Amino acid sequence: MRHPVILAALALLLGTAAAARAEDWHDNVDLAFVDDPAVLGQWVSVDFVATPDQFVPGAQRFQDAMYLSSMEFQPGGAMSWATDGEASTPRPWIVWTKGLVLHQGGDKTASGYTIKRIDGETYMFLEWKSGDYIIRHQKPRYYVLKKK
């Protein structure tokens, strides 16, 4: 037999969880593809910083293992990437368009990227919109990737 107090408490809990999910931040990820030949190819993570101006080539600030190991930007907006040091894997729910990496799966984020030449090397600064951004509404941090 179902107890009405337990059912009411469960309904309240589920309603609160649904309301919290409704407050999650999501970006517009339904954008047209615009080519960016400069981004094509493989990029390897070299640092993870709070802001791009904190990056110093050759002086890694982030001391832990980086979750994102590498990314490969392919023609037409396709992508693959490697996490936790594993092999690069195609991610059909993640695509790119000029200046943005679009997570069209559950996260629904549009992470901006900027490419800069520093000391003769090409680096990408990629907004990392994880749960800290989506749920906690924090500013994204940045992966710094070097073109291979």
Image (cartoon, rainbow, N blue to C red):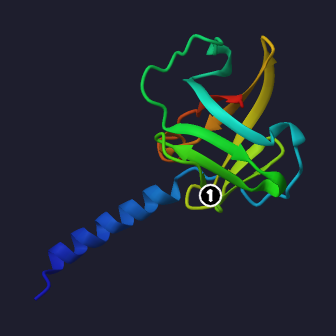
In percent of width and height, residue 129 lies at: 58, 42
Q: Which SS class for mark 1?
A: loop
Q: In the picture provided, is 120 more to the left or to the right than 47?
A: right
Which sits in the foreground, 89 or 5? Answer: 89
Q: Which residue is mark 1?
A: 91
So how many labels did they put on this image? 1
Q: Quadrant of residue 105?
A: bottom right
Q: In the picture provided, is 140 more to the left or to the right than 86?
A: right
- The image shows residue 143, relative to residue 96, as above or below, that is above
Q: Residue furthest bottom?
A: 1
- The image shows residue 37, relative to residue 10, as above or below, that is above
- The image shows residue 12, relative to residue 63, as above or below, that is below
In percent of width and height, residue 115 lies at: 79, 29
In percent of width and height, residue 32 lies at: 85, 58
Q: Quadrant of residue 44?
A: top right
Task: Answer few, some or many: residues within 10 Å of disc 1's Cα (few below 14, many 20 plus, some between 14 and 19).
Answer: some
What quarter of the picture does the C terminus occupy?
A: top right
Which residue is at a point 70% across and 45% down the rendered structure image?
A: 72
Which residue is at a point 77% across and 41% down the rendered structure image?
A: 41
Which sits in the foreground, 36 or 103? Answer: 36
Q: In the picture provided, is 5 more to the left or to the right than 109?
A: left
Q: Residue furthest left?
A: 1
Which residue is at a point 14% across and 85% down the rendered structure image?
A: 2
Hey, what amino acid is under mark 1?
A: Arg
Which residue is at a point 42% across and 25% down the rendered structure image?
A: 64
What quarter of the picture does the N terminus occupy?
A: bottom left
Which sits in the foreground, 40 or 56? Answer: 40
